[in-house]
Image (cartoon, helix red, strand yellow):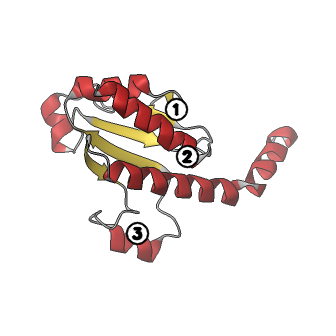
Amino acid sequence: VDPFAAYLLVRGLKTFALRMQRQNDNAQAIAEFLAAHPQISAVHYPGLATHREHAVAKRQMRGCGGVVSFEVAGDLDAASRVIDACEIPHIAASLGGVESLIEQPAIMSFYELTTEERLQIGIKDNLIRYAVGIEDADDLIADLAQALDTAFA
C-alpha cells in the first residue's frame, strides 16, 4: 500500500464517526422539513415514523443514513426546477462525500431505463435524491425552502 494513501485513510477514519453522525442528523432534519412542506408529495427516509421500515431501521441502525429521497408535487419539470434552484448541493449522481449532492434519478442515474421500467422500481419522474453532506443543517433547509419557493412560484 502506498504510504501516503495509507496516511490519508487513517486520517479520514479518525473523523469518520463525526461525519456520519452529522450526515445522519442533517438528513433527519431535512426529511422532517420536507415531510411538512406542502409542495412535497412523499418523503422516503427510514428515520421518519411514516416510513414503512422505520421500526426495522430503529432496531438495526444507530442512524438512518445521509440519503433522503422525496417526490415533489408535479412532474419531471417541477423536479428539475427544484434542483436547478438549489444553491448548496452540487448536481451529481453520486453519494458518500462530505458535500451535499442532489440528483434527479429519472434523467440521471436511471436515464437508460424506459419510463415503464423506472416506474416498476419506484423511480418516478418527480423523484429527487438528496445525498446530505456535513454543511449546517439550517443552511441546507433554508436552501431547500428557497428552491421550493422558486420552483413553485
Q: Which mark is residue 89?
A: 1
Q: Residue at x 52, y 41 (%)?
A: 140
Give the distance between the C-alpha atoms of the residues marked 3 and 2, in whole angstroms: 25 Å
Q: Residue at x 28, y 28 (%)?
A: 152
The quadrant in which residue 14 appears is bottom right
Observer-nearest residue: 59 or 117? Answer: 59
Q: Secondary structure at mark 2?
A: helix
Q: Is residue 69 left or right of residue 19?
A: left
Give the distance between the C-alpha atoms of the residues marked 1 and 3, in whole angstroms: 26 Å
Q: Which dot, 1 or 3, sits closer to the camera? A: 1
Q: Which mark is residue 27?
A: none
Q: Which residue is mark 2?
A: 138
Q: Which residue is mark 3?
A: 57
Q: Earlier in the sequence, mark 1 or mark 3?
A: 3
- The image quadrant where one finds the N terminus is top right
Q: Earlier in the sequence, mark 3 or mark 2?
A: 3
The quadrant in which residue 150 appears is top left
Q: Is residue 44 left or right of residue 133?
A: left
Q: Amino acid at mark 1?
A: Pro
Q: Residue at x 43, y 32 (%)?
A: 146
Q: Secondary structure at mark 1?
A: loop
Observer-nearest residue: 87 or 98? Answer: 87
- The image quadrant where one finds the C terminus is top left
Q: Amino acid at mark 2?
A: Asp
Q: Which dot, 3 or 2, sits closer to the camera? A: 2
